[in-house]
Amino acid sequence: MHIPDGYLGPATSGVMYAVMLPVWAIASKVVKKTLKAKQVPLLAIGAAFSFVIMMFNVPIPGGTTGHAVGGVLVAILLGPWAACIAITVALVIQALLFGDGGITAIGANCFNMAFVLPFIGYYIYKAISYNASIGSNRRVIAAGIAGYIAINIAAGLTGFEFGIQPLLHKTASGQALYCPYGLNVALPAMLGEHLLVFGWVEAVVTALVVKYLQKQSPELLEEGRRGI
Amino acid sequence: MKIITKFWLGMAVLILLSPLGLILPERFKAGSAWGEWGVDEMKKLVGYIPQGLEKLSSLWNAPIPDYAFKGWEEKGLAGLSFAYIVSAVIGILVTALVIFLIGKFLVKED
């Protein structure tokens, strides 16, 4: 889901940066107000977890690869704004040091994976686990469903951003300038592979860690403790 | 053991297992992620390289491109796996360091 340089035209890249700038500003403000110094190590682990989980490329035999993002889990533990900062840091380092995702596409990649994904996931988790006790199975299921839906929405948005490029940018002879695949190809490709395979990886990872934390460190799952 | 310590131990396990993210796609003959093809692959797929894509694709030269060391192409899957693990360690350390720096600037003391 890491859009490389050259797949998005300047219009899309620019708009995505323009959308993300205020999001990052608000995220910094909210985190400044609510995150406590002793939660910083957890935020660092959340960002590191997101970084490394994205290295686990899962193959579709004979096809493409994809991966989980881990962002819904970070949002469940630290709130969506802190998750936004954590995943942004992971994505920027992936782009700068490892060329995974483009420099011009940092706005778009962060919009999809560091903004939409943790927020959607967080609120789905909150809605489904509403009033459930910390140790309840409903929390595990809520985490799985939240992970599955959130990564699929992020994948759908990525497909949409790819897919509008041929509409926006073409040479006089009709060749694409950037991503050559339109919505009819990009959207079903990105959505299909995540609905079928990679969404389940995000779901399982998120649900399993929540289940583990119920036993090992239930206070991390308590609402209100973090105040975000 | 504190939960934070357990998390870092879990991270160490993930780092050691990370080459699975390289070996499994190779083993199951899976290609690039959708929309993350290089220019040569793009040419094979659509018959040409979109002009804007060609220009922008070389915009940035990452020091460890694709979590692999430059000039190690001949070393096979073992070398690639080693580079992948080193990349995971570097990536995690830098990520954690940046978060701690952000934390220092943003977060108030308790």
Image (spheres, grey):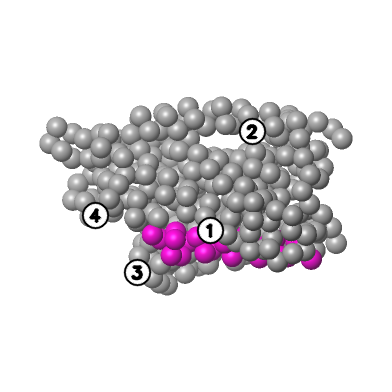
> In percent of the image, x 66 and y 31: which residue is there?
A28
User: Which comes sooner in the sequence, label 2 or label 1?
Assistant: 2
Task: Report the residue that reaches farthest toward the front.
Answer: A131
Q: Look at the image and give the residue range highlighted in magenta.
A: A192-215
- Left or right relative to B8: residue A149: left
> In percent of the image, x 38 and y 48: which residue is there?
A159
User: Which comes sooner in the sequence, label 1 or label 3?
Assistant: 3
- Where residue B10 sits in the image (x, y, percent)? 70, 62
Cα–Cα gap, marks 4 and 1: 30 Å
Give the camera-side residue of B10 and B62. B10
Do marks 1 and 3 share a subunit? yes
Pointer 4 chain: B
Query: Under tag 3, what secondary structure?
Result: loop
Pointer 3 chain: A
User: Hey, what amino acid is under mark 3?
Assistant: Gly
| Label of residue A62 in the image | 3
